[in-house]
Structure formats: structure tokens, C-alpha cells
Amino acid sequence: MLNIVIGDAELETIPDEMRNDPVLRRMANKNKKDINYMLLDSNYMHSIIERYYPGKSNRFGRPDIIYIFLEVALESILNKSGNLRIFIHTKRNKVIEINPEVRLPKSYNRFQGLIEDLFRKNRIVYNGNTLLDMYDMDLLSLLSRFNNVIVLSPHGEKNRLNNIISDDVCFLIGGFSEGDYITDVYKKYKSYSIFNEELTIWSVGMEVITEYERFKGLL
């Protein structure tokens, strides 16, 4: 089994200090959304985020990169063969467990609505099956559930995936577009870099998934 944890993900609702912003309130009213559960999204809120968090607008509010990663990973051969488990850990210490059989919306706007509903209810259930489950847990507590954890980071030791892949492994991938993990994962776990340039989380995820598919003889 391959476990992938997306760590310190920039996936959150509008922070408390931003909820009275008049522009955001107009945006919420226009889209008929509850601002308390509306996702922070730098694609639409870049200048507002910059006003409240100077210098952070390129990192904060990135549900789009989580969406792309999940769309790609859940359609993989590995997932369809029942050999992949995905966990999203947010920087606010929420963990989202993804049912491998979930079929996410193909539209990004509908994905936003689904995740906003998840933040409201903590669980998405369909026909008696839990598709998405969210609960409070910090990253190190989540990683402690796995015996073999490998941190992927551009700051790690250079290595090839085929040298570090193994059965029942957990790979940690950063859920942000720039910067580093907020959680100090380097003290406890070995970190590796698989390329000489920074990669998107979905490209890292697919490299890991494809290498594990080869390891399991699925390709």
C-alpha cells in the first residue's frame, strides 16, 4: 500500500480576521455563500490576502493545487487497483481522509463547494459511504500512524525514487506552492529531493504513484 500525505496544505476557510472585509462579504453575497465556510482562494483574493498577510499572497489560499493533485491521483492505475490511500493535512491541523472510491467533481467551482460543505459538516456521506472525513490532528501525530515515512522536499538529499520506494510506505508531500513545511518534520524523518528543480505537488505525486506502480508490477 502506498500512503500519500499532503502536509501543511494551504487549504482553509476565510480566516477570522478577514471575514469582515467588505470585498469578501460582497463576494460571498454574490455567490450565495456563508463567509464563515467560504474557502480562502488566492486566485480570486490575491490582493486582499496581500493586504492582510503581506508577502504571503502567493502561498496562502491554494485549494486549486489540492484539486489538481486529487483529480490526477484518484484517476491513477494505483488507486483504481486499491493500492493508494491519500490524506490531506491542512496548516490549521485538520486532516481529510479521502475514500479511494470517491469521484470528485470535474469542475473546480463544484470542488470548492464540496470542500466548503466538508468544512461545515466534517464528513461527506453518500449512500451510506463516507467519501471525505475531516478531523482535528497535527501533522506529526498523523505521520506517527505509519511505520515508514519519507519526506519529499527540494531541500532533502538527492536520490532517485526507485532507490527509496518500498512496500507499505508513506510519502509526505508539501501542500503549498512555495516555501517549506510549517511543521518541523526534518528532525524526525529522512528527507529526499527527487529532482534538481522545485516541482508542483501533482507532478511529485504522479512521479511517486508511477514509481510505486512499477514496484508493484502494475505497469
Image (cartoon, rainbow, N blue to C red):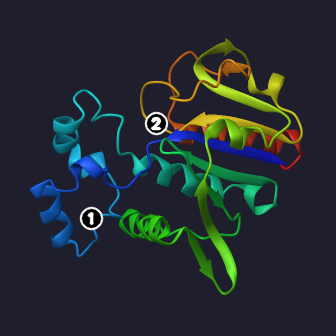
Badge 1 or badge 2: first in the primary sequence: 1
Q: Mark 2 — residue?
A: 176
Residue 18 position in % (x across, y down): 22, 49
Residue 154 occupies which quadrant of the picture? top right
Q: Name the residue nearer the viewer: 113 or 213.
A: 113
Q: Residue furthest top?
A: 157
Q: Name the residue nearer the viewer: 196 or 171.
A: 171
For the point 42% across and 28% down, the residue is 178
Residue 191 position in % (x across, y down): 69, 20
Q: Mark 1 — residue?
A: 35
Q: Nearer the viewer, mark 1 or mark 2?
A: 1
Relative to 92, is 174 above or below?
Answer: above
For the point 65% across and 51% down, the residue is 87
Question: Could you tell whether 72 is left or right of 165 in the image?
Answer: left
Question: Could you tell whether 202 is left or right of 47 in the image?
Answer: right
Relative to 81, is 18 above or below?
Answer: above
Q: Residues within 10 Å of mark 1 (few under 14, many from 20)?
A: many
Residue 126 position in % (x across, y down): 62, 82
Identified by mark 1, the residue type is Ile
Q: Is residue 208 visible?
A: no
Q: Name the residue nearer the viewer: 189 or 165.
A: 189
How far is the residue under mark 1 from the one under mark 2?
Answer: 23 Å
Identified by mark 2, the residue type is Phe
Secondary structure type for disc 1: loop
For the point 70% across and 40% down, the residue is 141
